[in-house]
Image (tube, rainbow, N blue to C red):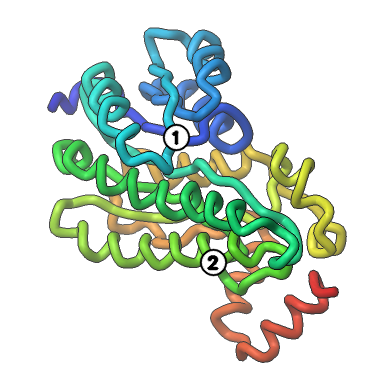
């Protein structure tokens, strides 16, 4: 696989929000960008905006394992190399646990967790062929301590965080870093339309943009020494404070703080 072609990134959930912001940031820097989402019309339109010669787009349901192989093959052929997989696709269920239908909980797990497993498993053969390749998983501050009204979402993000840690150790033998990004609330449609009703959002506010998260992804993906990069990257001052507190504060106090911010 050629190492002289522009570097490339395969983005899931690229139609809007963080995924779209990442695509725009990387395309501006001259990377070849893969745009994948269940909303194929949106990613095809984004491809035209970025320049069809600098991007490839397609429909991908990350929860369907069989969807991955043809899209990965087509992307790698078009790009000529496979530098970064960004597992960004995700959904939220924002309600008291028992008030959401069980099928919604299961669907969230299928996308947020199984989607990451599917992507890592299917992309590994391509990542192994490109020196210095990376996987960047979109995690969340909710992985630090389970959030009320986001129980299943928090569980999936905590699982993604653990998987990131495990694979970063396992795949060192392949020369692949596996990293994650942990933002708090980001000004995207998911937060505005659904998560905004949470008490925690009203208490803490929304201080991050999709571009803020994209800049962190850029810092983790650019061609620097991969082994000097942090395993977990909290985004924004609030998230960094919660990240430090989660490490230093006893569980009982973390629980009390979380309940005060978002409990009922």
Q: Position of residue 226 (x, y in %)?
A: 30, 51
Instruction: From the viewer's perspective, tell me whether residue 167 is left or right of residue 222.
Output: left
Element on which disc 2 rests: helix
**Which dot, 1 or 2, sits closer to the camera?**
1
Disc 1 crowd rating (10 Å Cα; few below 14, some 14-19, many 20+) is some
Q: Nearer the viewer, residue 133 or 11?
A: 11
Q: Secondary structure at mark 1?
A: loop
Q: Relative to 167, is 188 above or below?
A: above
145 relative to 12 in the view: left or right? right
Q: Is residue 80 left or right of residue 259?
A: left
Please say whether residue 202 is visible from this viewpoint. Answer: yes
Q: How many marks?
A: 2
Residue 156 coordinates in the image, percent (x, y): 51, 61
Real-space Cα separation, disc 1 to disc 2, in angstroms? 21 Å
Decide: is 138 above or below 144: above
Q: Is residue 181 visible?
A: no
The residue carrying pointer 2 sits among few (fewer than 14), some (14 to 19) or many (20 or more) residues within 10 Å by Cα, namely many
Quarter of the image containing the N terminus?
top left
Percent x, y for residue 246? Answer: 59, 78
The residue located at (69%, 47%) in the rendering is 186
Q: Which residue is mark 1?
A: 61
Q: Which residue is mark 2?
A: 155
Q: Quadrant of the C terminus?
A: bottom right
Residue at (40, 24) in percent of width and height: 33
Residue 112 vertical position relative to residue 67 in the rendered view, above or below: below
State the residue at coordinates (67%, 62%). 150
Residue 86 drawn at (x, y percent): 41, 41
Residue 249 figure quarter: bottom right
Q: Earlier in the sequence, mark 1 or mark 2?
A: 1
Quadrant of the rendered structure where residue 49 is?
top right
- Quarter holding residue 56: top left
């Amino acid at each position: 696989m050629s190492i002289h072609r522009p570097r490339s990134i395969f983005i899931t959930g690229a139609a809007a929000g963080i995924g779209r912001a990442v695509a725009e940031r990387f395309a501006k820097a001259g990377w070849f960008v893969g745009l994948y989402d269940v909303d194929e019309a949106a990613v095809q339109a984004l491809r035209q905006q970025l320049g069809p010669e600098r991007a490839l787009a397609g429909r991908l349901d990350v929860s369907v394992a069989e969807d991955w192989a043809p899209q990965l093959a087509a992307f790698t052929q078009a790009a000529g190399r496979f530098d970064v997989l960004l597992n960004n696709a995700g959904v939220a269920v924002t309600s008291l646990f028992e008030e959401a239908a069980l099928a919604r909980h299961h669907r969230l797990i299928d996308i947020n967790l199984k989607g990451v497993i599917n992507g890592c498993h299917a992309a590994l053969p391509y990542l192994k062929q490109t020196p210095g390749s990376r996987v960047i998983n979109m995690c969340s501050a909710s992985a630090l301590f389970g959030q009320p009204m986001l129980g299943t979402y928090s569980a999936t993000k905590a699982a993604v965080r653990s998987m990131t840690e495990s694979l970063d150790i396992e795949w060192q033998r392949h020369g692949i870093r596996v990293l994650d990004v942990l933002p708090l609330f980001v000004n995207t449609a998911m937060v505005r339309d659904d998560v905004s009703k949470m008490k925690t959002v009203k208490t803490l506010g929304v201080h991050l943009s999709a571009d803020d998260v994209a800049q962190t992804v850029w810092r983790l993906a650019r061609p620097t020494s991969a082994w000097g990069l942090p395993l977990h990257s909290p985004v924004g001052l609030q998230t960094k404070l919660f990240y430090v507190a989660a490490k230093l504060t006893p569980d009982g106090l973390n629980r009390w703080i979380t309940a005060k911010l978002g409990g009922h």
